[in-house]
Amino acid sequence: MNSHDIIILGGGLIGQTMALALDKHGLSSVVIDPVDPTTTLTTDFDGRVTAISSSSWKLFDALGLGPRMRAEACPIQRIEVRDGADGAPLDFQSDQDDDALGLMLENRILRRELWALLQQAPHVTRKFGQRAVTLDRGPHRVTAVLEDGSVLTAPLVLVCEGRHSTTRAEAGIAVAAWDYASMSIVTAMDHEVDHQGTAHQIFYPGGPVALLPMNPGTRSALVWSLPEAEARGMVKLGERAFLAEVSRVTAGLLGDMKLVAPRALYPLHFRHTAKMTETRLALVGDAGHGIHPIAGQGFNLGLRDVAAMAEVLVEAARLGLDLGDAQVLARYQRWRAADVMAVTFACDSLVRLFGVPGKAARAVRRMGLGMVQRAKPLKDLFMSEARGESGALPVMLKGDLVEPA
């Protein structure tokens, strides 16, 4: 029987980041995942990118990840939002002496560097290619029995299995869930016009189109959400016809284009759990929430879970508390519940607001965007949200480690 401070179920991006955050503070964890992460490492660009908010990047800096990836990340200096390609843009721009609004990073780079650091983490035990056959959350300990017969114990289990978590279901945590009957087309393109660090988001009743800046300046990622049947038909088009459609919905903002990655389809869902904790269990990342990619906040929301959970556990450990105690978990629940609810329902509301067809609805939306454009306090508030810097921030989202209690 092997004892650890924490059992982590799920070894994806959030699970690995969680383990590294605990390791940095001397807390031991065992990460269990049926998939071997080396099978997801690739040298080929597959078109998948992630928008990392400035506060999330500070977490990466605190973990030692940021410096390893900075040269390959593209800063987002400006965001332009339009209602239709012909709409006047609502723009958000970082001040000259300020940090970027965020950074765009290829998923393959993040996976590569996370995995490399995990190999060096002295307090992380890796159990990949293994499933927990049984998970017993007793009054004092959690006991997991793996397929290879290993018996692992800890005072707490963190569930980082993603939005289809079976452990969450087995724990009886209720989930509000619905499908948007839409899919996102994800790919990347080289283009004629330099993006100059600008991210474009163009809204249509059928779904938003996002052009996200990458390195070099003549490459951008595309995330285009459409009703399912339209999306499936769009990816079947030849490259020339597909790019003609992209140029149409983006009003040729980037000039001539060519594909540099395959086109992939991802179904869009909404998930929000009634709570994020149960007896000796806590949900972290998409296991507790799944949102529309309309604002690119899904992964950042999960990283805020990681930073908050790490701070709660580190401070509890330094006070000599039981890491799985109900009062310790209640602090995490209180800290994350409001932020998670605000972001998930704000994104869902945006989807519904911009999905209303008709000239009257478009006129109202454009008037609203114009009002925000002219109101600096409102713009500053939205920029703070985009950076992930609003509310009571965990210290790791400020680039620091948790100080001794």
Image (cartoon, rainbow, N blue to C red):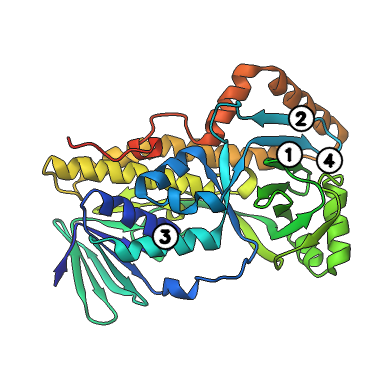
Left or right of 96, for residue 182: right
Of mark 4 and mark 1, the one earlier in the sequence is: 4
Marks 4 and 2, how far apart at CA: 14 Å
The residue that label 2 is drawn on is 365
Quadrant of residue 7 in the image?
bottom left
In the picture, the quarter occupied by the N terminus is bottom left
347 or 252, nearer to the observer: 252
Marks 4 and 1, how far apart at CA: 13 Å
The residue that label 4 is drawn on is 85
Marks 2 and 1, how far apart at CA: 8 Å
Asked if residue 62 can be seen in this view, the reply is yes
The residue that label 3 is drawn on is 114
Left or right of 54, for residue 166: left
Dot 2 surroundings within 10 Å: few (below 14), some, or many (20 or more)? some
Left or right of 365, for residue 67: left
Of mark 3 and mark 1, the one earlier in the sequence is: 3
